[in-house]
Image (cartoon, coloured by chain):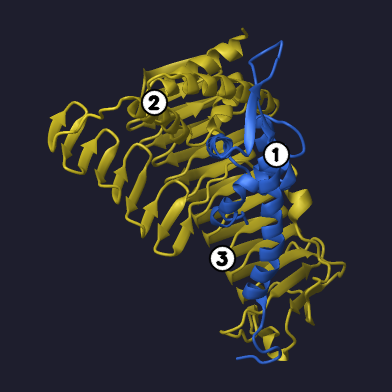
Amino acid sequence: MAISKELIRGHTDTIILNILSQGDSYGYQVSKSIRLLSHQQYELNEATLYTAFRRLEKGGAIASYWGDETQGARRKYYKITASGQQQLITALQEWEFAKDVISQLITGNMHEGVSL
Amino acid sequence: MTSIEMEIRTRLDIIFSKYTPNAQLTEFKEELIADLMEAYQDFAKQDKSHDEALDDAFDQLGDIDVVLRDLSQTNRTDEATHNDEPKKAPFIDISDDGFHIGNLHIDGQGVRLGDDIVIDGKHDKVQFGDWLHVDHDGARVGKKYYKFDDDTNINQSHFDDTVDDVKVPSWAAAHHNAQIPISDKQFVFDYHDAIVNFYTNDKTDLITVDEYFNRDNARYFAHIEENDDRVLISQGDHPLLFHVRTRINIGFPKNFDTGHITSINHSGRVIAQNLTLDTFNLIIHSGGFEGQQIKAKNASWEVHSGTIKADKLTFDKAEIFDKSGNVKLKNATIPHAKISATSGSVQVDHFIGGGQFSANSGFLRLRIDELTDDLKLHAHSSSLRVTAPETQHFNFDLSSNSGIVTVERHNNIHYDKNTPSYKRGFYGTNPKFTIDANANSGTIKVY
């Protein structure tokens, strides 16, 4: 079973913010972290990832800078900003609240013990 | 600059060439080069050849055109705001750029009527107002969303983490247990709405059925019926209004190699591990299948909507069909295989055997360790890529109706026919089996 894109779509930004809140990172490394964190159950392709980077950068939640690699290609690193940290905290609170309500809504019974 | 970096740059240049260069695109290209070089290093560890690793690295980009178009357009709107007098477009305009009447636009991108009706040929996207969206990811009609599953990697540690064990689920409020003596009858497990888990129990001649429910009502327990040639285990009553969470663990004795098992599941996934059977048939209407370490003479799997993922399979004969979902197999030994997917992709790594493989709209990717028979491969509208065995010699007959055929081997190769879309010949000196591949509109690559 794969996690539905529809289910996870609204959380893409929060996922990225969570990863960047643990240290600056670059595109390929973020996509690897997502695979790792989800125990290989979820992956974002580069196109989706960079669309989200651009959206977050425009909104001021993340900023980017070029690394100073001496070998190979230069890497662009992304870092979370103070406003991004705040956005992450808010998103986590929203999620904590929503997940219990949604879980009750989709598994709860109206009349415990009554079956049809 | 390394030769890998050169090759990545060259390929990216081709992708980027469709867009007018600007600073943002140039920066983005630099970012992608670093990512692709790292992805290449990762793939090089599992792929046999340089070209394969490079193709795999580029495959994981996804639909990068969306980002490129966005980046190139950002620039254009910036320019437009700098320009104080925007040019007013004529009502009717026919030029090399396309055909425009009012807000109807027909051009290289596709057809647009205002912002509401869009047929985007370039990105395979169709949109009618708010109520119909179809693209690579899925289709949304009104409030219903149909996902086109397209994740592309089989992950090494997948099974270690996710195959559920046979513990009592924490939510269980009721437990029903049944034991059925083994025989050479056909055992049919018919479930409507449950997660079904097949495993090997510690019995010598008993099949164990453990059912767990989150509500306690004996009417939910399975019925068992037996006649001369089969034993039917079917799910008990099933309330229509409430969802009853149901988990079924079915244990077979070790090495039940005379066992004829059929599992029918209407909704819910099926998991199977460490099984040795004679026949293992599966029909799943809605839900995926995950399997590990399965041995059988015959297997016939039919999944209508869901992904098939399996590792360490040994079958004499297997027919695997997935209507809407991907098929991902690893370490599969199947001398007589028939594997097809209608709308998902087919990916098989470390394959030993022969047979037929086809994918109608997703890609077909095979990594073959050894051929024991001929292979017949077909991809309708996507690409077909095959890693032939390294040391084994083989014949090939590869044709694509409108794509390109390439064979990435340069020594010991002999061509009878060699055109861009058709290649026939053999590799090595003593070929025994033939790789026959046909693609309708995609490319074919043999490594």
Rounded to the nearest whole Å, what is the CA distance between mark 3 and mark 1?
52 Å
Give the label, 3 or 1, closer to the camera.
Answer: 1
Identify which amino acid the numbered label 3 is placed on: Ile
Q: Is residue B446 above or below residue B299?
A: above
Shade representing chain B: yellow
Residue occupying image coordinates x 18% and y 33%:
B89
Q: Is residue B385 above or below residue B420?
A: below
Proximity of marks 2 and 3: CB atoms separated by less than 8 Å: no
**Dot 2, how many residues are within 10 Å of its Cα: few (below 14), some (14-19), or many (20+)?**
many
Q: Is residue B102 left or right of residue A57?
A: left
> Which quadrant of the view contains residue B39?
top right
**B411 or B235: which is nearer to us?**
B235
Mark 1 highlights which residue? A82
Q: Quadrant of residue B291?
A: bottom right
Query: Which residue does the numbered mark 2 point to in the structure image?
Result: B404
Q: What kind of residue is marked 1? A: Ala
Q: Chain of mark 2?
A: B
Q: Position of residue B295 (x, y in %)?
A: 71, 54
Tell me the CA gap for discs 2 and 1: 51 Å
The residue nearer to you, when weighing B338 against B167, is: B167
Judging by the rendered image, the residue that carries numbered circle 3 is B283
At mark 2, the secondary structure is loop
CB-based contact (under 8 Å), mark 3 and mark 1: no
Answer whether labels 2 and 1 touch (C-beta < 8 Å): no
Q: Which disc, if any, is residue A102?
A: none
Q: CA distance from mark 2 to mark 3?
A: 37 Å
Q: In the image, are marks 2 and 3 on the same chain?
A: yes
Chain letter, colour blue: A
Which corner quadrant of the image does residue B425 belong to? top left
